[in-house]
Structures are given as structure tokens and as C-alpha cells.
């Protein structure tokens, strides 16, 4: 009999709590089962398997898959999984498997996948509880992921908790792939659903409703149900297969004890999983040298690199810049000198009207900044590659930035202070010594004219452009390529340059003046082979610079300088050449205290 039929059969005849006839249910003193006033034979079980919730703070219930090994053999159950693509920090999409669980209040991501994605995390403590209220794990981090289905570009954003392991590989049983008639021609979220693979993501109830669409498709008994979602059809339900052979044991106490022991261990540095960087791959495939030894590189574009119209905005900003020329003649002269030099050095070229009409392309607006502290380039034009085109994307939005290649500045300063004979220099116009391939120059166009009475002309910048997000990576990676290519000709100098150049600043030295002289000559030859010129040479021992052209020196000989003139700026600090000491300039501002300021501090 069904439970409802049992209840009707005994209604008014006996106690529904203990099934005896000598008293009624309210008078019964026996407590059985779920605390309601009925016998276990009359209990209606919740088919959804929902558990009682306890009032506790910062505790979220997460379903935890487990298999119990016993004598009774039951039909295995297929859980809903899908193939998704998650966007990494570099912009590359990494494919992984996700478990879709509408009984989980949280979404999870494995630490292994988080390391692959190299995405930023937030420090948040999350206590995760599983079946029967047992603490499954305590997570200290969360992250935001952007994912798409494996067959489309539809984007979803999700906050996920980082855990060591989401669950065991699914499905946790073996069965042959059969052609189920009701699944024919369906776009499945996980086509190879019969193959067991690791699970790196759990999509919880917060996104479950957003994924659903349409009505489920049911098949015969013993076949999975197909549920339509935006990730494709997910499959779940009982399936005829051999009995389960795996059991999972909850060892919560052991895990907690292990965590306690780990606190006492000396921390170890875990090597990051080496994943090929798409920006590095793009560089390695495209880099080449011309007859002069200069390097030619491509712009590292992302997969979706469509840009809108941009020339109109560039023209309007040029008009605004020309209006400033009327107010400041010195500003205008500095700007014209810079642009004429840019053109004379071959760093940009005028293009024909026919090439100007070719698409796709990108026009970059620009403005001028003045740096009074600079000893060489006080005026510089800054190109704004972050300016949005008409489709809402900028050039920087579609370029990969690449990994960080420069080492810590502190390490360079410490090593610089270890030499008895110290010297410094910088690479002249480093970015502009590296050429951009002809096919990518169309994405570095500008509009310019010498005077407002001239007609507008279009130009293409032919070198790496400061203002583009990939410029630091391309410049530093090109230097590394130079050291690698010329290592056989300059073994010692390649090692010194690799370890002692920070961005475009060389800070090095030697134990003797003779050794320092030799290094200075050879390291110039090394960089010159790639089209780079070292200038602004300075040293604590002026004799090592005697063989250099005066135009390459940063200052006059030390013996002719006063105290202030003998100082050079290195990496933002002051280097006193006479005393060979690093100094920091502290600006003392006399602040007139007013009642208003004092009251503001007190408040």
C-alpha cells in the first residue's frame, strides 16, 4: 500500500503514532522518527532530499558526492556535467569540465584550475558543510570567472570559491557509449558523457536558473534525461551499468589534524604550472631581423580583435591640440620638433589615400606632456591607445599585454652597490628601435599636419608605440631575444645585460677599471648589433669613460663639477658620482597651519 492509503486505512481506528487502539494520537507519549505525530510507516519522505537548515552565520551547504559500498547493488546515477571555456588572465580560454548542481548554494573552482587561469583572488573565509552537517572544507579565497559554452561565445560571470578539489572524476562508473534514440541530433553539453574525466568547476544554484531553457526530453527507463540549457543539453538520471566500485570516506577529523600539522611546517615555494603564454607564442612565431640587425615584431592580438571607426575622433582631438598652440608658442615649437624628428628618423611614414581607405585600421589620438626633470627628452608625445573606437573597443582592448618580464627594482639597486667601479647608462629611444611588421602598422595610424593651414595627412607609426598595452612586453622580450641570439659572440656581456638592465637602464660595474672599460666597449657592441644605442654614460670612476664620444656622456668630467652637478638620477633615486652613494631627496614643505586645518585634523 502507498503511504496515503495506509493513513486512510487507520484513520479513526488507532493511534497514528504507535498504531495501538487503546488511545488516540494526542495522548501518545512515544517519540518516533522525525518528531511529527505519526509512525515511520506513515512518514512521507521528501523526494527532493532537502535537509534541515540550521541558523548559522557564513555557512553554506554544498552537495558532496559520495558512494557507499555495501551488499545491495543499485543502478548508478549519471550527474549533470558540461564542457565550458573559462577566460584566463592572458585572455586565452581554457577548456574544463563543470558539474551542474542545483542543490549547492555555492559555486566552486579547483585550486589547480585557478593556478592555470592565473586570475586574481579575494581573501574571504568560507566554511563549507556537506552531508549530515559535516564540515567539508574551509576556503580562504574566492575569484570571479568568465565562462562560455564550448560551442558559442555566450558569456556568463560567476563568483566561485577556491577549493583544493571539487569532487572525484565523473562519471564514477564505467559503461559503454550507446546510441540513445531520444538523444539523437541533440547538442550535448558534454558529448563524451560516458568517459570519466576530472571536475574542476561546480556551478551552483545561483546560476542554475539562468542556464535552463526549454522542457526536458525523457527516454525509456534506464536512460538519461536530457535537460536543455544554454550550455547544451545536460544529461542526468539512472542508467544501466555495472555496479559502483568506488567508495569515498569522509575523513574530516584527519583533514583538520593535517592542517594543524601543516602550520608547523617550513613553508615551501610551489612552482607554478607552466602554461604556454599566448603572447609569448605570438612573439616567438613572428619575431625576425632585417638586414641591419633590427628586430621586427607583430602586435599580439586577442582572438576577438574587431575595432570600430576611429579616424573621426582622432581628427577632433588634433583640432583641440591645435587650439592650445595659439595660447602657448613654446608648446607648439616643442611639439613640432618632436613630430619632425619622429618623421626624420623613419619612425613614422606618410601613407597614400588608397592605403588610408583600407580596412581594418585604427587611428590613435595623442597629446603632449612635458617632463622638466628629463635631461634629454623634456617634451614627449603620448599616444592614447586606450581611446575607444565607435564599437566601444580600443586598440588596447584587443591587444594582449603579455607576462611581466622585468625583475624587482630593489634587486638591481642592491647589485649595483656591490661593484667597486660602478657605471650607468640608458638605451636611447628603446621602444622606437624595434620595428612593427608592415601588416600591423595600419593599427598604429595618426592624423597630423605641421600647421592648421595644411591639409590633414595620415601617418603610420612603424615602431613599438608607448601607450600600447603590449609595448613593455614586446620591448623587453626583444632585448631577451637579442641576448639569446648574440650569446655566442658576446657570452659575458649577454649575461651582464640580462642581469643588469632594468627596462632601458643599465646599472652595472666591475672590480677594476680595466675590466669596466672592457665591459663598456663590448656591451655597446652587443646592443648595437640589434640597433640599440647606449647613451648618458656616467661612472664613479671617470677614467673608464675616456674612450667614449662626448655626446654619449651624461655630464662633464667629475673633477670639473660642483656638488649638485655631480649627481645623476638612477631608477628614480639620486646617485652622487663623487662619493659613489645613493641619496633620496626629501622635499620639506612649509605648511601654514590654520584653524580650519587644525580642526580638520582633530575631527
Image (cartoon, helix red, strand yellow):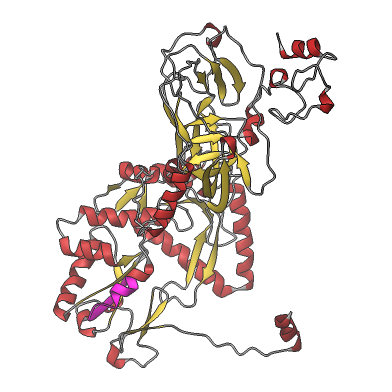
Image quarter of the C terminus: bottom right
Q: Nearer the viewer, residue 423 or 314?
A: 423
Q: Is residue 104 left or right of residue 440?
A: right
Q: Is residue 140 above or below residue 156?
A: below
Q: Is residue 202 above or below residue 212?
A: below
Q: Which residues are magenta?
A: 412-427
The spot of residue 158 in percent (x, y) is 59, 40
Q: Is residue 481 left or right of residue 517?
A: right
Q: Nearer the viewer, residue 300 or 356?
A: 300
Image quarter of the N terminus: top right
In which quarter of the view is residue 208 placed? top right
Q: Is residue 567 left or right of residue 92?
A: left
Can the viewer see residue 426 in this picture?
A: no
Tell me what residue is drawn at x 72 percent, y 30 percent: 31
The spot of residue 390 in percent (x, y) is 62, 43
- For this orientation, the residue located farthest to the right is 12
The spot of residue 29 in percent (x, y) is 77, 30
Q: Is residue 149 left or right of residue 316?
A: left
Amino acid at each position: 500500500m502507498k503511504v496515503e492509503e495506509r493513513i486512510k486505512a487507520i484513520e479513526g481506528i488507532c493511534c497514528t503514532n504507535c498504531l495501538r487502539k487503546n488511545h488516540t494520537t494526542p495522548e501518545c507519549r512515544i517519540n518516533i522518527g522525525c518528531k511529527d505525530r505519526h509512525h515511520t510507516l506513515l512518514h512521507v519522505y521528501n523526494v527532493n532530499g532537502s535537509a534541515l537548515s540550521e541558523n548559522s552565520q557564513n555557512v553554506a551547504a554544498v552537495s558532496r558526492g559520495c558512494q557507499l559500498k555495501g551488499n545491495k547493488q543499485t543502478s548508478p546515477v549519471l550527474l549533470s556535467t558540461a564542457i565550458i571555456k573559462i577566460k584566463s588572465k592572458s585572455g586565452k580560454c581554457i577548456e574544463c569540465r563543470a558539474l551542474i548542481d542545483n542543490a549547492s548554494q555555492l559555486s566552486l573552482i579547483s585550486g589547480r584550475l585557478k593556478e592555470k587561469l592565473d586570475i586574481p583572488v579575494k581573501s574571504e573565509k568560507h566554511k563549507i558543510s556537506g552531508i549530515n552537517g559535516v564540515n567539508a572544507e574551509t576556503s580562504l579565497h574566492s575569484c570571479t570567472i568568465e565562462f562560455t559554452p564550448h560551442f558559442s561565445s555566450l558569456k556568463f560571470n560567476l563568483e566561485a570559491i577556491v577549493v583544493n578539489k571539487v569532487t572525484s572524476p565523473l562519471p564514477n562508473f564505467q559503461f559503454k557509449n550507446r546510441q540513445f534514440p531520444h538523444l539523437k541530433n541533440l547538442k550535448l553539453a558534454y558529448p563524451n558523457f560516458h568517459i570519466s574525466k576530472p571536475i574542476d568547476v561546480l556551478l551552483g544554484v545561483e546560476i542554475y536558473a539562468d542556464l535552463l531553457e526549454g522542457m526536458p526530453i525523457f527516454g525509456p527507463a534506464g536512460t538519461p534525461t536530457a535537460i536543455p540549457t544554454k550550455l547544451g543539453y545536460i544529461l542526468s538520471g539512472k542508467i544501466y551499468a555495472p555496479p559502483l566500485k568506488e567508495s569515498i570516506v569522509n575523513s574530516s577529523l584527519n583533514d583538520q589534524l593535517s592542517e594543524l600539522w601543516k602550520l608547523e611546517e617550513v613553508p615551501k615555494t610551489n612552482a607554478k604550472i607552466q602554461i604556454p603564454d599566448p603572447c609569448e607564442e605570438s612573439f616567438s612565431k613572428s619575431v625576425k631581423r632585417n638586414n641591419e640587425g633590427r628586430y621586427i615584431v607583430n602586435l599580439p592580438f586577442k582572438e576577438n580583435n574587431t575595432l570600430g571607426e576611429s579616424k573621426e575622433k582622432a581628427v577632433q582631438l588634433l583640432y583641440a591640440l591645435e587650439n592650445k598652440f595659439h595660447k602657448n608658442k613654446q608648446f607648439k615649437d616643442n611639439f613640432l620638433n618632436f613630430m619632425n624628428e619622429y618623421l626624420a628618423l623613419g619612425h613614422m611614414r606618410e601613407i597614400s589615400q588608397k592605403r588610408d581607405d583600407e580596412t581594418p585600421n585604427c587611428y590613435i589620438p595623442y597629446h603632449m606632456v612635458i617632463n622638466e626633470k628629463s635631461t634629454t627628452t623634456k617634451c614627449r608625445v603620448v599616444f592614447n591607445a586606450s581611446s575607444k573606437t565607435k564599437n566601444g573597443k580600443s586598440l588596447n582592448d584587443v591587444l594582449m599585454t603579455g607576462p611581466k618580464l622585468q625583475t624587482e627594482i630593489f634587486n638591481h639597486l642592491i647589485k649595483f652597490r656591490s661593484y667597486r667601479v660602478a657605471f650607468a647608462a640608458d638605451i636611447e629611444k628603446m621602444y622606437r628601435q624595434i620595428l612593427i611588421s608592415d601588416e600591423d602598422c595600419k593599427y598604429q595610424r595618426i592624423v597630423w599636419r605641421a600647421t592648421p593651414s595644411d591639409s590633414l595627412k595620415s601617418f603610420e607609426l612603424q615602431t613599438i608605440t608607448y601607450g600600447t598595452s603590449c609595448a613593455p612586453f614586446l620591448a623587453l622580450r626583444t632585448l631577451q631575444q637579442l641576448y639569446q641570439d648574440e650569446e655566442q659572440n658576446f657570452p659575458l656581456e649577454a649575461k651582464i645585460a640580462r642581469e643588469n638592465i632594468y627596462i632601458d637602464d643599465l646599472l652595472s660595474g666591475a672590480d677594476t677599471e680595466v675590466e669596466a672599460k672592457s665591459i663598456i666597449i663590448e656591451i655597446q657592441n652587443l646592443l648595437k648589433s640589434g640597433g640599440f644605442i647606449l647613451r648618458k654614460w656616467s661612472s664613479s670612476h671617470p677614467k673608464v669613460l675616456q674612450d667614449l664620444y662626448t655626446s654619449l656622456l651624461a655630464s662633464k668630467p667629475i673633477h670639473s663639477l660642483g656638488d649638485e652637478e655631480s649627481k645623476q638620477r638612477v631608477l628614480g633615486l639620486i646617485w652622487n658620482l663623487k662619493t659613489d652613494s645613493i641619496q633620496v631627496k626629501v622635499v620639506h614643505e612649509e605648511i601654514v597651519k590654520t584653524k580650519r586645518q587644525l580642526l580638520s585634523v582633530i575631527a
